[in-house]
Amino acid sequence: MDASPESAPHSSDNAARNRLVIAILLVSTFVVFLNETIMSVAIPHLMNDLGVTAGAAQWLTTAFLLTMAIVIPITGFLLQRINTRPIYMLAMSIFTLGTLVCALAPGLEMLIFGRVIQATGTAIMMPLLMTTVMTLVPPEGRGKTMGNISIVMAVAPAIGPTIGGFILAHFDWRFMFYFTLPIAAGALLLGATRIRNVSNPRYAPLDVLSVIVSALAFGGLVYGLSSLGESAEPGSAIPSWLPLVVGVVSMAIFIWRQLQLQSEDKALLDLRTLQHRNYTLALITMAIAMVALLGSSILLPIYTQNVLGLDTLQTGMILLPGGLLMGVMGPIVGRLYDRVGPRPLLVPGVIMVSAVMWALTFVSQYTPVWAVVAGHVTLSFSLALAFTPLFTASMGSVPAPLYSHASAILGSVQQVAGAAGIALFVAVMSLRTASAAAEGLEAVDALAAGIRAGFLCGAIISVAMVIAAFFVRRPEGGAPGMGGH
């Protein structure tokens, strides 16, 4: 049994194989993350080209988020039952098929369907990467590897809008998918020929009731929160409270069901992961960071285009330096984490995130572009200090049998928190913009006032993130890799 993946996953004999597997997973995760944000600047173009309203076009984002929220909770089960190679092939095949459907879509309905297929593959990739890294990399080297993951998480979303803006400036919107398709197909082919099985699947029962209730719970919350922002706009009659109520009630039933099943190791998401205090604290800090990050990522393009009057390509270029810096910082922060642990990196990082959020509450139509770039670069640098320690400390705080559940819970919370951030910022912005317009302010000034209110909301929330960060510590067994504590 010495050759089994489980028996000696960290052994030097397997080092080359492990590096190859992680590298392929990183490349593939980069592709699916790039796809998530390449569409962010395309909504106005799609509205014109397809002749649809903003509300209809927004379903391209909402449907993607919804699918992610529904599929991610099931990945904990899939990662236990299916070995590395087949689940990788499944995820990338689904994603590549979805990309092809999007590229060939004649209209909005088929495009949304393609995005749903893409999201299904995307939802599997991140938990697969996180669980594989935790299985293969010894505690003293996890910071460095998580730093490489943060490159993927930072650079792909950063260059996505820039690439999307460039493509839309010169080509039809379908070329966004023609651009992604060969990269996805190449990653699929590379994985088919080179990836190896490194996990040790075991029997895990699937509770059908948990799957149904989790879909209603996570789907209801994400959809309700997404439509909350739209319902804040004047003239909207979307009953956003209804899916939210369904989501909250279903979540209560889901939690009750998991608590019943986990004593027999039959839970879809094993909530015993939350009994590990450090994991839970890191999870809470991560959730607040996602609220601030995704909320601000929605407001910044609206601000640069509709208040400062910049185009999509210029907006993409403004966001590019920060994203690239975040990518460069990833390995550096990862190595520092292995030496000093999370707190010396995390605490300054979240304090700076909060400071930038407060600074953004002063933006106006007269704010110079360089100040926006400087603010975004500082925000990106600060998040680079925060995300690698949070990922590493959270996943390192649970025992190995719970890795798949921990990564699935982390992914689910990120989706719900991201949807909450977008909903909250957009709702506050819309309400304040409407009231400012009613006070007699011009359209641009009213929108600027709304954006400031949205950032104020994020700034207040960020204070809770700063407080939580002080309590995150290095996981037991993750001692510094430099020969001492």
Image (cartoon, rainbow, N blue to C red):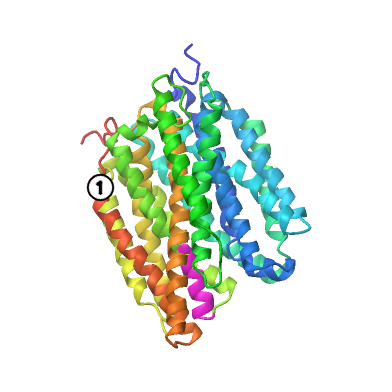
Question: Which of the 4 quarters of the picture holds residue 296?
Answer: bottom left
* Residue drawn at x 40%, y 69% as measured from the top left: 454
Tag 1 secondary structure: helix
Identify the magenta region. Answer: 297-309
Question: Which of the 4 quarters of the picture holds residue 446?
Answer: bottom left
Front-most of residues 403 and 167: 403
Crowding at dot 1, Cα within 10 Å, few <14 / some 14-19 / many 20+, comes out as: many
Does 103 sit left or right of 465 as displayed? right
In the picture shown, does residue 442 fall above or below 23? below
Query: Does the stretch in magenta take in 203?
Result: no
Q: Position of residue 232 (x, y in %)?
A: 49, 67
Q: Could you tell me if residue 320 is visible in this image?
A: no
Query: Does the stretch in magenta take in 308?
Result: yes
Q: What predominant SS class does the magenta segment belong to?
A: helix
Residue placed under numbered mark 1 in the picture: 343
| Amino acid type shown at disc 1 | Arg
Q: Position of residue 355 (x, y in %)?
A: 29, 66
Question: Which of the 4 quarters of the picture holds residue 378?
Answer: bottom left
| The C terminus, quarter of image | top left
Does 482 sit left or right of 451 as displayed? left
Q: Position of residue 143 (x, y in %)?
A: 36, 41
Q: Could you tell me if residue 194 is visible in this image?
A: yes
In the picture shown, does residue 226 fall above or below 140? below
Does 375 sit left or right of 478 as displayed? right
Q: Position of residue 472 (x, y in %)?
A: 26, 44
Q: Count the marks: how many?
A: 1
* Residue drawn at x 46%, y 54% as measured from the top left: 418
